[in-house]
């Protein structure tokens, strides 16, 4: 749908028949950025170190706030497709979409390392946010049949340490197929001379509220058999594990722990 | 979050002017704007879900709900740019033969009125939910004002006739399992489970103590307990002319 929008914006008559002036458009690499992933201390005193962080998503959108005066057709069409705060569950979105990277992508922060997702298309301007939609991973996404991420949206693995003890954990999350994550911070002005790539980050610590992705999880209490291993997923039936899953998934599906940045020569620019 | 209101501009005149080329192309028959006077009427309707109840087959977990009271206090109604003096509080459980209840009437120039809006000041909901032999009662008051603006439906006023703008209240939204899904499930079991003292009544205080569990509050999060969850859902019930959407502004 977004590809169609870009195509519509490029239609010759729009800019060749006395229509609005074309806003400059640029293409930039969109990449994984794992630089923010480091051990964190949770509110319950656990030191958590991630060894794996993979999330299946599709269709990135990049948004500016307010109106895009250079191309009123873009604005009117975008607002039709991306209404803001409609009085109905399912219609809470913000900003006007002026950048896109369509397709399915595995955000493999760990242990994958730096990786290009694709080439995004952007109208120059001052960006304020980004969106993507969660997806369920399949073999068509290039995963091995034995990959535990198959059929799920995300997997986070690592070790939680406290008072000399340690627990290896594996958290798997499922999000509804149409669940969109909106409002990732992406506060940069993109110009034609902008050469930097676009980086997508996972943030174990919310930079604004300072809470961690794992706050509220009492790893030792949830490891009821005391074997030093804790697995939490969407099929739990134990009340405590179900509660922990719901809490973790809620955090996973908020924009607090994601960020989009510009990456210049391997470093994020402010 | 509050939002100040801008001075209404005469949108019906704007649209009359914008329609001028069509008039020139197709003759006077294409012009319906600006010819004479009519009237506009605002009504409020809770549909069968409020007047008769939400049946078991509408829920995804076997519960059904009947309302003893569903009072809505409305203010600041404007249809296009026409402000209406409204008789503000209506109990939507009162049978209306599908017509809803009248809030007010005003004269209006013939033509198309757009971007209508209204404020819901307060909602009082009382009723009972049943599943098998289980029954739970509730009485909840939501008194954070919510402004519904720029509603999608247009209201066309014909000369000498009265056009209706209906504020439609969707009670089923109160039982959605998601604030962001296009196709949420309707559930009552999590609310029933919040009757912590098991006395049969689900109170605001009990709801405030219970985590929202698997409910999805969306990308911003910030909703952890069931009372806050219900308050957020109560701000999504307002619509226009049935299924028409409006922009929402939380004025609490």
Image (spheres, coloured by chain):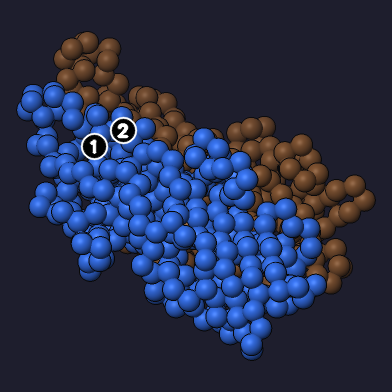
Which tag is nearer the camera, tag 1 or tag 2? 2
Q: Label 1 is found on which chain of the structure? A: A
Residue at (49%, 48%) from the top-left corner? Answer: A56
* Residue A193: % across, % down: 10, 52
* Residue B247: % across, % down: 41, 48
Numbered mark located on residue A74 in the image: 1
**Quadrant of the image for the C terminus of chain A?**
bottom left
- Extreme residue toward the right, this view: B133
* Residue B28: % across, % down: 23, 13
- Residue B89 seen anywhere in this rendered image of the structure: no
Tally of marks: 2
Q: Label 2 is found on which chain of the structure? A: A
Tell me what hue chain B is rendered in: brown
Q: Residues within 10 Å of mark 2 (few under 14, many from 20)?
A: few
**Quadrant of the image for the N terminus of chain A?**
top left
Residue at (44%, 78%) from the top-left corner? Answer: A210
Are the residues under badges 1 and 2 in a single subunit? yes
Residue at (21%, 18%) from the top-left corner? Answer: B22
| Sequence order check, earlier mark of 1 and 2 | 2
Numbered mark located on residue A3 in the image: 2
- Residue A18 seen anywhere in this rendered image of the structure: yes
**Mark 1 element type:** helix
Q: Which chain is blue?
A: A
Residue at (8%, 24%) from the top-left corner? Answer: A17
Of residues B60 and B72, the one nearer the viewer is B60
Instruction: Report the side of B169 relative to B163 (left or right).
Output: right
């Amino acid at each position: 749908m977004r590809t169609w929008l870009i195509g519509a914006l490029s239609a010759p008559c729009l800019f060749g028949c006395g229509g609005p002036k074309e806003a400059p458009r640029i293409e930039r690499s969109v990449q994984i950025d794992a630089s923010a992933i480091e051990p964190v201390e949770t509110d319950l005193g656990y030191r958590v170190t991630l060894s794996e962080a993979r999330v299946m998503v599709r269709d990135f959108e990049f948004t500016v706030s307010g109106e895009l005066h250079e191309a009123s057709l873009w604005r009117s069409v975008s607002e039709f497709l991306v209404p803001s705060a409609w009085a109905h569950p399912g219609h809470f979105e913000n900003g006007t979409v002026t950048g896109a990277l369509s397709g399915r992508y595995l955000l493999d922060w760990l242990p994958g390392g730096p990786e290009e997702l694709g080439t995004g298309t952007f109208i120059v301007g001052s960006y304020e946010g980004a969106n993507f939609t969660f997806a369920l991973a399949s073999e068509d996404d290039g995963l091995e049949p034995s990959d535990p991420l198959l059929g799920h949206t995300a997997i986070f693995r690592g070790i939680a340490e406290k008072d000399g003890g340690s627990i290896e954990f594996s958290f798997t999350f499922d999000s509804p197929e149409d669940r969109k994550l909106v409002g990732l911070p992406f506060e940069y002005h993109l110009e034609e001379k902008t050469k930097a790539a676009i980086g997508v980050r996972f943030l174990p610590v919310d930079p604004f509220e300072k809470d961690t992705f794992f706050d509220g999880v009492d790893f030792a209490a949830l490891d009821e058999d005391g074997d030093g291993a804790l697995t939490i997923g969407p099929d739990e039936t134990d009340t405590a594990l179900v509660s922990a899953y719901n809490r973790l998934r809620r955090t996973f599906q908020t924009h607090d722990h994601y960020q989009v940045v510009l990456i210049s020569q391997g470093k994020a620019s402010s | 979050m509050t939002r100040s209101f801008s001075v209404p501009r005469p949108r019906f005149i704007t649209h009359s002017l914008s329609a001028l080329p069509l008039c020139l192309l197709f003759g006077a028959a294409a012009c319906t704007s600006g010819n004479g006077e009519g009237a506009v009427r605002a009504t409020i309707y809770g549909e069968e879900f409020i007047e008769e109840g939400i049946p078991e087959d509408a829920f995804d977990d076997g519960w059904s709900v009947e309302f003893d009271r569903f009072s809505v206090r409305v203010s600041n109604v404007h249809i296009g740019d026409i402000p209406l003096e409204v008789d503000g509080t209506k109990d939507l459980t009162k049978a209306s033969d599908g017509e809803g209840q009248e809030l007010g009437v005003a004269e209006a120039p013939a033509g198309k009125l757009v971007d209508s809006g209204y404020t819901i000041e307060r909602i009082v909901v009382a009723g009972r939910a049943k599943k098998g032999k289980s029954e739970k009662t509730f009485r909840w008051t939501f008194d954070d004002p919510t402004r519904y603006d720029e509603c999608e439906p247009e209201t066309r006023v014909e000369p000498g006739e009265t056009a209706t703008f209906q504020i439609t209240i969707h009670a089923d939204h109160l039982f959605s399992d998601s604030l962001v899904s296009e196709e949420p499930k309707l559930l009552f079991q999590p609310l029933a489970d919040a009757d912590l003292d098991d006395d049969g009544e689900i109170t605001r205080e009990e709801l405030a103590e219970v985590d929202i569990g698997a409910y999805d509050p969306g990308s911003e999060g910030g909703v952890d307990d069931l009372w806050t969850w219900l308050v957020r859902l109560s701000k999504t019930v307002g619509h226009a002319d049935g299924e028409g959407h409006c922009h929402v502004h939380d004025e609490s």
